[in-house]
Image (cartoon, rainbow, N blue to C red):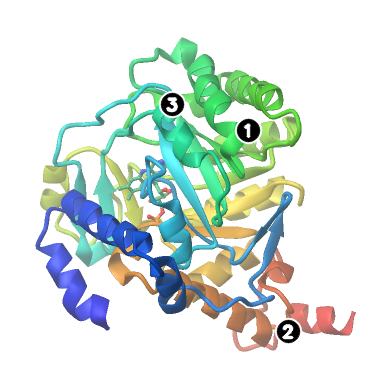
Amino acid sequence: MLYRHILRPLLYRMDPEKAHHFAFGALRRTAAIPGGKGMLRLALSPKADPALTTRVWDLELPSPVGLAAGFDKDAIGFEALGAAGFGFVEVGTLTAHAQPGNPKPRLFRLPKDRALLNRMGFNNGGSKAAEPRLAGSRQTIVGVNIGKSKITPAEEAADDYALSAARLAPHADYLVVNVSSPNTPGLRDLQAVESLEPILRTVRETCEQAVPSRRVPLLVKIAPDLADEDIDAVAQLASALELEGVIANNTTISRQGLRTDPAAVRELGNGGLSGAPLKARSLQVLERLRAKLGPQTVLVAVGGIEDADDAWVRIRAGATLVQVYSSYIYEGPTLPKDLANGLAARARTGGFARVQDAVGLPQATPGVSDGVARSRDIG
Ligand SMILES: Cc1cc2nc3c(=O)[nH]c(=O)nc-3n(C[C@H](O)[C@H](O)[C@H](O)COP(=O)(O)O)c2cc1C
């Protein structure tokens, strides 16, 4: 209510990127005052609930609802975001070299579509600068998303990723190789398995050398615009390389099916579209990956998740974890708690002790009693 009727209209008067810095700054400042994190937890975190506890890799997450990459690119506020209700936070994309990103304006709202369009271009202070912020103990589970520096040619991509992996893997609860942003020229071509395989092998070796005491979970984040056979090829590669997970998916370059006036959309220019228009394709990509991959490959669903129903559908389709970005902007700070509580309620109604128990168990047809859940109760 407060967000929708007072804060959001105020933020919407600001340029979207400025509004992001303003709101994120306010959150960090609140977390920094004595007792601030406790206050945030009280107001915005779901209550500790065994139904939400998610065990994945060697981690125990308080909730399967996380914040997607791109919000905290420089790893400056993950503890504040953890206190604000996210079960985990993915920082980045961080690149080996600091870079300014694309000229502004580069972030736009499409409120009629509950969508965002961005061509940020991996603006970030670089993996070297981020390292000390990630080192040391913390309360929040943090995934680290790495990308290729703009100045690095495609042929040297593996070494560029490896440099960031060497710096950040020791501090990452999981590491993501991002090859799917549309805003770094040529980056998405790295999704072709001939390019992707050497990158992932090099990053894995780097992780093993940099962190001999622990197997750092390694994930790849893909685009929703891949053709189905390319999704299958990535799935096959993920299996062959024993990746711990796949994140589906990044923003789309498609502009189909939008309610916003096409001329106005064209005027905004290039960039990746996120939010509600991604919902259907993201689910398809997830389902395709689940069909191709064994249970040892964890799937992280992201793209157009707006409410607990969307999140529950992704869990039932095979995602162990879900992430949001655009809907956090549209729905406001109570979203992580609303999604988590909604998931726990749906699990209980379905007869599952934990949300995690429902992963990959398709829902019965609406109106028909939940046979899957009942058989689990009985069995
Ligand atoms: C402004 C903005 C910046 C983003 N930056 C990154 C990024 O740096 N790295 C990345 O992997 N994804 C990035 N993303 C993509 C999101 O992580 C997510 O995959 C995408 O927005 C789909 O989720 P959503 O529909 O919930 O927004 C960004 C998205 C937005 C809106």
Residue at 65% from the left image edge and 38% from the top image edge: 235
Q: Is residue 245 visible?
A: yes
> Is the residue marked by circle 1 packed among few (<14), some (14-19), or many (20+) residues within 10 Å?
some
Q: What residue is rendered at 27% in x and 38% in y?
A: 120
Q: In the shown orientation, is residue 310 left or right of residue 5?
A: right
Query: Circle 3 is placed at which residue position?
Result: 128
Work out whether 55 lies above or below 352. above
- In percent of width and height, residue 293 lies at 72, 46
Residue highlighted by disc 2: 351
Which amino acid is tagged 2? Gly
Which mark, residue 233? 1
The image position of residue 99, as x and y in percent, is 29, 26
To which quarter of the image does residue 307 belong?
Answer: bottom left
Q: Is residue 303 left or right of residue 65?
A: left
Mark 3 and mark 1 lie on one chain; the one further toward the N terminus is 3
Query: 358 or 142, which lies in front?
Result: 142
Residue 253: give x, y in percent of width and height.
33, 41
**Which amino acid is tagged 3?**
Lys
Q: Quadrant of the N terminus?
A: bottom left
Spatial CA distance of label 2 from label 1 is 36 Å
Cα distance in 3D space between marks 3 and 2: 47 Å
Mark on residue 180?
Answer: none
Q: Earlier in the sequence, mark 3 or mark 2?
A: 3
Residue shown at 52% from the left, 76% from the top: 46
Who's the residue at 16% across and 64% down the image?
11
> Is residue 276 in view?
no
Q: Is residue 22 left or right of residue 325?
A: left
The amino acid on which the numbered mark 1 sits, given as a three-letter code, is Ala
For the image, the number of numbered tags is 3
Is the C-beta of the residue carrying label 3 under 8 Å from the nearest atom of ligand 1? no
